[in-house]
Image (cartoon, grey):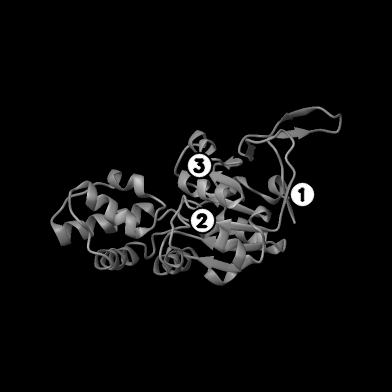
Amino acid sequence: MLTVKSEFRTDATGKTGKAAPGQLRYTGPVIPSATLSGIIFDMDGVLCDSEPFIAAAAIEMFRETYGLEVTRDGFAPFVGTGEDRFIAGVAELHGIRATLPRDKERTYEIYLKLIRGRLRPLPGAIEFVCASRGRGLKLAVATSADRIKLDGNLSEIGLPAGIFHAVVTGEEVELKKPDPQIFVLASERLGLPPQRCLVIEDAPNGLRAGKAAGCLCLGVTTTFDAEELRAAGADLTAPDLSAVTPETLYAP
């Protein structure tokens, strides 16, 4: 079991003060007490940062397929929505219609070559996953990406999919984030009600989905700033998972 602590700490004299820099920040009530049994991780921006690689792969796909020069900035509105929308959305901005699944398959071919030997876990990701599993928490990954990308990413960062009790990919849900479907399905596969799960996300759409599912949400500021994540519903924020240790997150 896990108890999320607030940004306030009470010392032996009963005096309450702010937590040390780098620790979790709670944006709800002053004294939260949320006991959880499961953690649902987004993948990109939480466990690893593959956005530069998938954007580079899509840019190359657009160049070779359509003779179109697109920029990484054009993909920003579609981060976390799944590769179908990631590609089709940029195509629409340039007045063309993407051919799916062909364009996505070609993008993945390029992507899997680009990440080889280059994709790394984000700070604290592996340690946090292992520590959480060691405490008996049920773990899931819920990503809008397709299974081919999930397997490629986890293999490259040295975190096998088998360490998680459940996996949900974008191919398995009809509605994408910010719809809560992906997190509801993940909690079902863990055998837990959403209220007993902590969702860890880096994007506003993911946090909106987690809150709509009924989960407590931790936003990591690897992609968006804390203010944007709080506005999207984050109950807690942290720079990354290296700031979320058993000492700051788990009850003794």
Residue pointed to by mark 2: 42
| Residue 12: quarter of image | top right
> Disc number at residue 57?
none
User: How many neighbours does mark 1 have within 10 angstroms: few (below 14), some (14-19), or many (20 or more)?
Assistant: few
Q: Please, what is the three-letter code of the amino acid marked with disc 1?
A: Ala
Q: Are marks 2 and 1 in contact (CB under 8 Å)?
A: no
Residue 144 located left or right of residue 217: left
Residue at the disc numbered 1: 251
Q: Measuring 27% from the left and 55% from the top, which residue is drawn there?
A: 88
Q: Nearer the viewer, residue 187 or 133?
A: 187
Callout 2, which amino acid?
A: Asp
Where does label 3 land, which residue? Answer: 221
How much space separates mark 2 and mark 1, taking CA atoms? 23 Å
Question: Looking at the image, can residue 101 be seen?
Answer: yes
The residue sitting at 67% across, 62% down in the picture is: 192
State the SS at label 2: loop
* Tag 1 secondary structure: loop
